[in-house]
Image (cartoon, coloured by chain):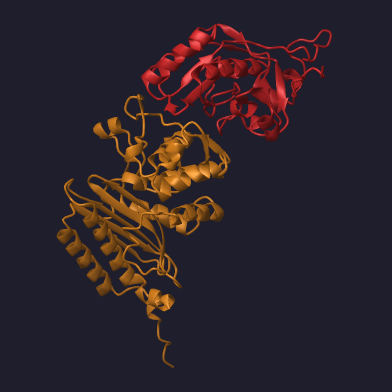
Amino acid sequence: MAAPPVRRDSALPHLEALEALRLRLERLESESGARALALAVYDTKTRLTFRHHADRWFHAASTIKVAILLGVYAAIHREWLLPHSRLHVRNRFRSAVDGRPFRVLADRDANSEVHAAIGKMMRISDLAHHMIATSSNLATNLLLDLVGLDTVQQSLDELGLVGIDVRRGVEDERAFEHGINNRVTADGLAGLLRLIAEERAFTPELSRQMLDVLHAQEFKEGIPARLPRAVRVAHKTGDISTIAHDAGVVYPPAREPYVLAVLTEWSAESSGGGRSATIAEASHAVFELLASDAARSGDG
Amino acid sequence: MGEAYQFPLRVVDGLRLERPIRDALLPGRSLCDDGGRPRRLPRYFYEIPTWDDAVRVQLAPNFGLWEFIQTDVRESVALRGFPRYVPCAITMLGLCLEQFRLTVGTFVHIAANGGYRSPRHALSCNASPHCWGTAVNIYRIGDVLLDDREAIERFAAIARSILPGAWTRPWGIEHNQTDDHLHIDFGYVVSVPHDAPADPPGATSSVGDP
């Protein structure tokens, strides 16, 4: 009796397909003008991993906020905080270099809602939302200031995550000038997001809460940009002068999710649109490899 | 002539409160100020049964009690719910602020953690007058955010000129200085209202559990 046919979408991609993806990424890296492009994929359905320069360190930009989100939920898990605990919104932080105070400039922050609350209080859950959904730098520093660098790094260590190096808050210009920066690898971000996607970050309930926050992302020019509309993505972007990243969990309809981290580095003269298009192209290539059949069947 | 007005909150002896509350308020205990001098914390407190009461009770025409008890997650867990307790000197602080508000002629906004906070609040350092209910941090006056030297020093000068005995924290980034709010305080004033419970005969400051 002949073996039943193996459904294409339940099988690992062929080696040829993986090699084609690698060549496509190399071509993209070369043609886009990026100084570097790194990518890490983990497919929760097939357990496939795909890595392209995935252990190269990059300045983290705002993707470090996923690690800070983990630190906040570590504090919630340890019952130091509740999601509805309230925190004084104060725009005054201490530099990682010398402890001198600095502020987050409102005109350099994508979110004005947190700045409008200076002097008042906001809930931890709302600050976490703003930190991720609109990448509020003020919310980020408030949360990091509250839970502490040690809590964030300790949480990463306890969960066995490597490739994420949290050293300071955001907008700490003196630290930047002294080379004290948050760093990530594609492997590191993908590992953290995998843990959350598989509901292994502290508890399933807390993992789902973190995913809800990541699903609220409002910047969609990267990973989601060229995916079918039915595909949901829980993710975090990161952009500074020479950096553009996006890392998230991709949920094609009627298929298990996959984790994707795309990290890029650029010259300061490069355009923002080209960077986003490069990330979107890399994301599309991975989607075609893993999930295009499932998405088509779920689009109907 | 109608009945005499009575302040609507009950005065309680902090030494007779339940242990977790007492451990947070430290009634009658000493804390050292920045100069190493011991300062005795208040023993008598107004009890605020609910948040609605805090909103309803006015300390002055333009200041509700709720504005002085807005503390965040850094406050002791025992003091995050109700009933809440504030030192009795908070009434005098309210009146002083009213005078300040009438002089500046516009809204005076007290910052979160900027009114009363307990000695167990993570931001309470040494003998902070905030633990006596005699200090406020003001982050905004009218439309002016107090986050630069000019604004802070201008309003600090007004406060000192109209409020005898008031101390304002100087502008700066060092310890005991301020660069993002106006701090006004009246030192280590302790208020014991007439209706404060009497000490039982032979009572000491260690009434209650050891």
Q: Quadrant of the C terminus of chain A?
A: bottom left
At x 44% / y 34%, what residue is drawn? A145
Q: Position of residue A38 (x, y in %)?
A: 26, 56
Query: In which quadrant of the rendered view does residue B204 lie?
Result: top right
In front of the other: A130 or B63: B63
Colour of chain B in the rendered structure image: red
Residue A249, quarter of the rendered image: bottom left
Total numbered labels: 0
Horizontal relation, residue A9 to residue A58: left or right? right
Q: Is residue A60 left or right of residue B157?
A: left
Quick check: A215 above or below A87?
Answer: below
Residue A212, placed above or below residue B153:
below
Image quadrant holding the N terminus of chain A, namely bottom left
Q: Which chain is orange?
A: A
Q: Is residue A73 visible?
A: no
- List x then y, in percent, for residue B180: 42, 24
| Residue A85 found in image quarter | top right
Q: What residue is shown at x 33% (from left), y 24% (from top)?
A: A98
| Residue B5, x across and y down, in percent | 77, 19
**Looking at the image, which is closer to me, B124 or B187?**
B187
Q: Considering depth in this image, is B148 or B47 the residue closer to the camera?
A: B148
**Residue at left 21%, top 67%?**
A24
Nearer to us in this view, B199 or A148: B199
Q: Residue at x 47, y 27 (%)?
A: B142
In this rendering, would A240 be left or right of A112? left
As drawn, the residue found furthest toward the right would be: B201
Classify residue B173 as left or right of residue B54: left
